[in-house]
Image (cartoon, rainbow, N blue to C red):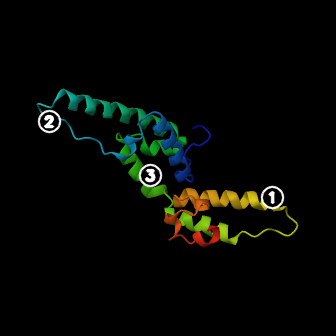
């Protein structure tokens, strides 16, 4: 996480890395689920345990998130207690909309031409990396010609 600290310009990459760490720790649910409301009088012991676990997990995730930010950015979020509030605020400010990322990747793919005199191998590697990036962004396995790709502009190229 040290090399992938959030610096204000790498939100999408930072979030992917944070989710990887939190998935490993079984804490990713804290990012998306809102803070449970206070327990009413007469709550069941199981409800109390669930509530206490969420509070403890929220504290852990809060620390992980703050530790993965540059110091200047930490100062803006260290007063917020619940993680979903931090994530919502960060998304509003820093997130790059998915469609912009998909557009840039698609533009790079279709605009890439093999430079004269360059090796076919290096061009092939570059094109494969662009295909993999598009697969990740579109959530598809383009090279398998899956029927779900039929609506994609890329289907005619690979099938």
User: Which residue position holds label 1?
Assistant: 121
Q: Are marks 1 and 2 in contact (CB under 8 Å)?
A: no
The quarter of the picture where the C terminus appears is bottom right
Q: Which of 30/92 is in front?
A: 30
Q: Residues within 10 Å of mark 3 (few under 14, many from 20)?
A: some
Q: Is residue 34 left or right of residue 90?
A: left
Which of the labelled discs sits on residue 68, or is there none? none
Q: Is residue 118 left or right of residue 152?
A: right
Q: Which of 149/20 is in front?
A: 149
Q: Position of residue 17 (x, y in %)?
A: 54, 43
Give the Cα separation between the discs numbered 3 and 1. Answer: 41 Å
Give the Cα separation between the discs numbered 2 and 3. Answer: 31 Å
Residue positioned 53% across, 62% down in the render: 146
Q: Position of residue 78 (x, y in %)?
A: 42, 40
Q: Quadrant of residue 55?
A: top left
User: Which residue position holds label 2?
Assistant: 40
Residue positioned 42% across, 57% down in the render: 92
Q: Position of residue 122 (x, y in %)?
A: 79, 58
User: Which residue position holds label 3?
Assistant: 90
The quarter of the picture where the N terminus appears is top right
Q: Quadrant of residue 120?
A: bottom right
Q: Earlier in the sequence, mark 1 or mark 2?
A: 2
Q: Are marks 3 and 1 in contact (CB under 8 Å)?
A: no
């Amino acid at each position: 996480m040290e090399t992938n600290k959030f610096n204000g310009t790498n939100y999408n990459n930072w979030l992917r890395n944070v989710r990887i760490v939190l998935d490993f720790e079984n804490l990713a649910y804290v990012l998306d689920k809102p803070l449970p409301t206070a327990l009413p009088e007469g709550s069941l012991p199981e409800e109390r345990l669930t509530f206490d676990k969420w509070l403890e997990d929220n504290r852990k995730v809060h620390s992980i998130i703050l530790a993965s930010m540059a110091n200047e950015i930490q100062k803006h979020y260290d007063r917020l207690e619940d993680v979903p509030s931090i994530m919502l605020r960060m998304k509003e400010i820093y997130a790059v909309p998915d469609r912009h990322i998909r557009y840039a990747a698609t533009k790079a793919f279709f605009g890439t031409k093999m430079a004269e005199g360059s090796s076919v191998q290096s061009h092939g590697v570059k094109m494969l990396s662009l295909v993999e990036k598009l697969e990740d962004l579109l959530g598809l396995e383009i090279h398998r010609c899956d029927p779900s790709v039929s609506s994609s502009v890329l289907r005619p190229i690979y099938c």
